[in-house]
Amino acid sequence: MPYVFTEQGIAMLSALLKGDIAINVSINIMKAFIEMRKFILHNGQIFQEINIINGKLIEYDEKFEKVFDELQKNKQEQFTQKIFFDGQIYDSYSLIIDIIKTAKNKILIIDNYIDDSILKMLSKKNKEVEVVILTSQNCNLNKLDIQKFNKQYPTLKISYTNKFHDRFIVIDNKELYHCGASLKDLGKKCFAISKIEDIEYIEKISKFS
């Protein structure tokens, strides 16, 4: 049995059903169809304009997203050096997050004093970006932390070395940042983050990953 009738179906049904109740129901249903038709005819232009507006909003959202992406990209391209003073914890943290977000394929972090706070920063990375951390054997980042992180934000790898004194971040083997403080101590003392443009240094440091 059908669940609904068209207007024509109701007209046919009214010719078959007998009785006052059936006739009144059929008449009321026909009136409802007529009112629906009038409403659609009178407001069709409004519905069309609403659909056009919705389409424009979707188009504008896409354009705004592209603009914001370009602004973020330009922000990173213009950044060369930033000095943070004691207490500027959030500002320095935000800059590191911005750097991490620019990675499309790989992030190399070199820091001998790394701890689990780096995992919170790396959770902001783009999906499928590989992360390699070079640190000392005495770092405060255990295997369980790494395993849990990799289940949700793959892939993070840890390697150990004693060949570095300073802290570095390499993005996609193309951009190199020198950090004057350990990433776990951002904003606790005066330090600087600098972008190193020399491709020779980028290539030499990237080889350690």
Image: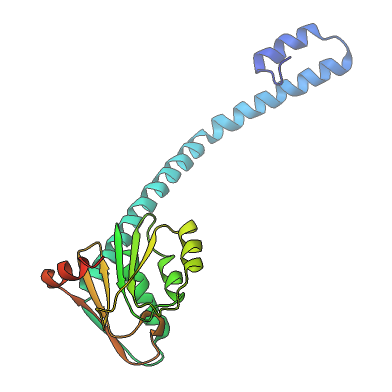
Q: Is residue 24 left or right of residue 170?
A: right
User: In this view of the protein, can residue 103 be seen by the observer?
Assistant: no
Tell me if residue 121 comes above or below residue 92 in the rendering: above
Q: How is the image coloured?
A: rainbow
Which quarter shows the N terminus? top right
Q: Residue at x 26, y 83 (%)?
A: 165
Tell me if residue 60 comes above or below residue 27 in the rendering: below
Q: Residue at x 77, y 19 (%)?
A: 27
Q: Residue at x 38, y 93 (%)?
A: 86
Residue 61 rendering spot, x and y as whole percentages = 39, 53
Which quarter shows the C terminus? bottom left
Q: Quadrant of residue 178?
A: bottom left
Along the line of sight, the residue nearer the viewer: 19 or 153: 153
Q: Quadrant of residue 188?
A: bottom left
Along the line of sight, the residue nearer the viewer: 45 or 192: 192
Residue 129 rendering spot, x and y as whole percentages = 35, 58
Residue 23 rendering spot, x and y as whole percentages = 82, 15
Q: Quadrant of residue 139?
A: bottom left
Residue 181 rendering spot, x and y as whole percentages = 32, 85
User: In this view of the protein, can residue 56 be seen by the observer?
Assistant: yes
Tell me if residue 64 comes above or below residue 124 in the rendering: above
Count of picture labels: 0
Q: Is residue 24 left or right of residue 75?
A: right
Along the line of sight, the residue nearer the viewer: 12 or 89: 89
Tell me if residue 81 comes above or below residue 47 in the rendering: below
Q: Residue at x 71, y 15 (%)?
A: 10
